[in-house]
Amino acid sequence: MSKHKVVGDLSKPLALFLMILAAQGLYFAAPRIPLMFSRLEVSILNPVCQEIYPVQVTLDERPLTNLEEANFEVSVDDRPAHFKLIRNRTIDALLLLDTSGSMAPPSKIEAGKNMTRWIGDTVIASGGKIALIAFNDQVETQSDWTDSTDVLNSAIDGLQGSGSTRLWDAMTEAVPYLQAMRTSRPCELTALVVISDFEDTASLTSEDQALNALEGTGVVGIPIVYGSFVDASLVSAEHVAQATRGRLLRASEAQEAILQLQRLLDSIYYLAIEQRGHMRITVSYGERTGSDEIDS
């Protein structure tokens, strides 16, 4: 028989004590937890001219819009390189607007038209030009390159949703327009903005053919997937972004898409770098760093 007197089960008080200590540790560590798990991503987009490199920076997949030159470092062939941060770049944009039957509900087609108007205003305000191609059963150029909001709005006003979707045909037919703009204005960023649910139903061109044609244009693709998860293809849209070193946006409301696009444009930084070779651009923000590489 044990000579020790049992006064109670100490396991529960001990567990409670350990829980209190753990909670206090979490409390004091809380300010550092976001730093430990946050992810800073740096993406070099398609260069413009031969020395200007657009760089898009995100933190936890959210665009960073407040960086300065001191946040960047550049090396070429593993040696520090001189660079200059350039602001207020001109943007040219070719917009492909899905006007098929899936966009027919008034709220959807009007949302697409409102996004188009906002993009046109933003591009023209930057000193750039915009062109508009609408696609359903047909692929039709509604407006060639213009810097007139009146011309663009006139082209938008009469659009209605009906018919099938020739997404890949529209992208293929957009290539000559993009090449012409890149040739005439090689030192400006040219964007291909596609507003669609990305559910192709009638193209004669395959997805691979369209993406291969886009890869050589030097444009930055911004696919805006508009619609619910049920009736939209994120996979096809991501393929467009990857083929053009661009960015995928996902929205169910026009205002949400516009806000995302504005933050995306604000988070693109233009670095003028004259040296050539294997380039590495590194961004530091607080305690986090990220980088991307490209052969220039």
Image (cartoon, rainbow, N blue to C red):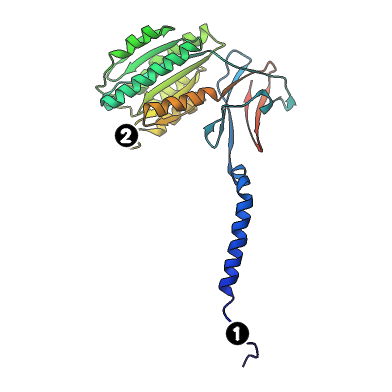
Q: Residue furthest bottom?
A: 1
Q: Position of residue 200 (x, y in %)?
A: 33, 27
Image quadrant in which you'd find residue 294? top right
The count of marks equals 2
Q: Secondary structure at mark 2?
A: loop
Left or right of 105? Residue 54 is right
Q: Is residue 45 above or below residue 26?
A: above
Q: Amino acid at mark 2?
A: Asp
Which residue matches tag 1? 6
Residue 296 picture location, percent across and down: 64, 20
Q: Is residue 158 left or right of residue 66?
A: left
Residue drawn at x 59%, y 58% is 23
| Image vertical order of residue 6 relative to residue 191, above or below | below
Q: Amino acid at mark 1?
A: Val
Residue 193 pos. (x, y %): 43, 20
Pick the front one: 9 or 91: 9
Which quadrant of the figure contains the N terminus? bottom right
Secondary element at image label 1 = loop
- In the rendered image, is residue 172 in sight? no
The residue carrying mark 2 is 231
